[in-house]
């Protein structure tokens, strides 16, 4: 006789779960179409590195839904949409369409959003622990906002470490250079007395290569190698982290009634929230 076994319901696929969120699925579908068209064009033109970036983007677009399934949390639609737009803006528009070069503040805008999103993620991690019945502590709103801010800044610093490493090892120039017309350096002090020497109105830089050939850069100034870009990235990351930490503080203060912060803070799914 056949055994009566209770059939376990089959879990829906990633795409099926996306379809349940109409706004999220619409944005995902539009972005996916753009990425596929871009991938075909890049393959046709022989830009296989960009083809890899397109494949990576398609995978990353599914990452929020994949995380939801694996650790059983529910991402707010607003947060999920912003994450997908951020991925598309960074990989497709920024790298392939060269928006980082075409639009001078494109990178700063993305780092500001990154600071905001990372603060939201850091805040939600602490908020989940704070609401978990297995833990006996209750963190103050100020402490939770501070942890979210520190988490965001840590991610920002680690990313700058990654960019520096890739520039030093693979010479990718991820830390974009800046043209400046004034520099100050103690290395130029002829007396070696640690006094900064200021040079103003720099119009050109001439390189003397190892074979004694000369090359004029013709860039209209001195080339700062990534330092200004790094500090700008960290500063705008700081701004994004402060903005969310501010709203997160009042979210906890109002015991979860803040409408703005609630759009960016995931919640843990309980067994009662599962589909039968």
Image: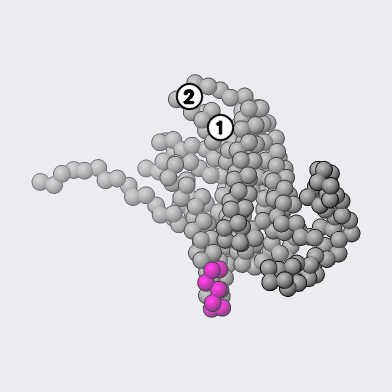
Q: How many marks?
A: 2
Q: Image point 44% across, 42% down: which residue? A: 71
| Percent x, y of residue 251 | 64, 32
The answer to whether residue 128 shows anywhere in this view is yes
Q: Quadrant of residue 100?
A: bottom right
| Percent x, y of residue 233 | 70, 49
| Percent x, y of residue 176 | 69, 58
What secondary structure is found at the residue carrying circle 1? helix
**Residue 266 or 244: which is nearer the viewer?**
244
Q: Is residue 176 above or below residue 78?
A: below
Q: Which mark is residue 261?
A: none
For marks 2 and 1 on the same chain, the one whose residue lies earlier in the sequence: 1
**Residue 16 or 219: which is nearer the viewer?**
219
What secondary structure is found at the residue carrying circle 2? loop
Answer left or right for 133 relative to 149: left
Q: Image point 61% across, 57% down: which residue? A: 167
Answer left or right for 109 relative to 183: left
| Percent x, y of residue 216 | 78, 70
In the current view of this chain or complex, which residue is farthest to the right? 201
In the current view of this chain or complex, which residue is farthest to the front? 191
Give the residue pinned by disc 1: 127
Q: Which residues are magenta?
A: 44-50
Give the residue pinned by disc 2: 135
Q: Marks 2/1: CA distance?
A: 12 Å
Colour convention of the picture: one colour
The answer to whether residue 236 shows anywhere in this view is no
């Amino acid at each position: 006789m056949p055994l009566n076994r209770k059939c376990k319901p089959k879990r829906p696929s990633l795409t099926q779960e996306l379809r349940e969120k109409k706004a999220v699925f619409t944005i995902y579908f539009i972005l996916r179409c753009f990425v596929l068209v871009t991938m075909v064009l890049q393959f046709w033109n022989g830009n296989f590195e960009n083809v890899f970036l397109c494949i990576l983007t398609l995978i990353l677009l599914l990452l929020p839904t994949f995380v939801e399934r694996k650790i059983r949390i529910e991402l707010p639609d607003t947060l999920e949409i912003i994450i997908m737009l951020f991925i598309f803006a960074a990989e497709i528009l920024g790298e392939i369409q060269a928006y980082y070069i075409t639009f001078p503040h494109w990178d700063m805008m993305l780092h500001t959003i990154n600071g905001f999103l990372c603060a939201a993620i850091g805040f939600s991690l602490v908020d989940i622990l704070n609401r978990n019945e297995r833990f006996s502590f209750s963190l103050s709103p100020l402490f939770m906002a501070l942890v979210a801010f520190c988490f965001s800044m840590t991610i920002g610093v680690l990313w700058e470490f990654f960019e520096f490493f890739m520039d030093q090892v693979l010479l990718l120039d991820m830390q974009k250079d800046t043209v400046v017309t004034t520099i100050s350096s103690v290395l130029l002090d002829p007396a070696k007395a640690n006094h900064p020497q200021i040079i103003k109105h720099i119009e050109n830089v001439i390189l003397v290569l190892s074979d004694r050939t000369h090359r004029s850069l013709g860039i209209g100034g001195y080339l700062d190698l990534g330092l200004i870009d790094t500090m700008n990235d960290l500063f705008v990351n700081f701004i994004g982290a402060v903005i969310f930490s501010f709203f997160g503080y009042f979210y906890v203060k109002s015991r979860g009634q803040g409408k703005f912060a609630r759009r960016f803070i995931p919640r843990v799914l309980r067994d009662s929230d599962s589909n039968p």
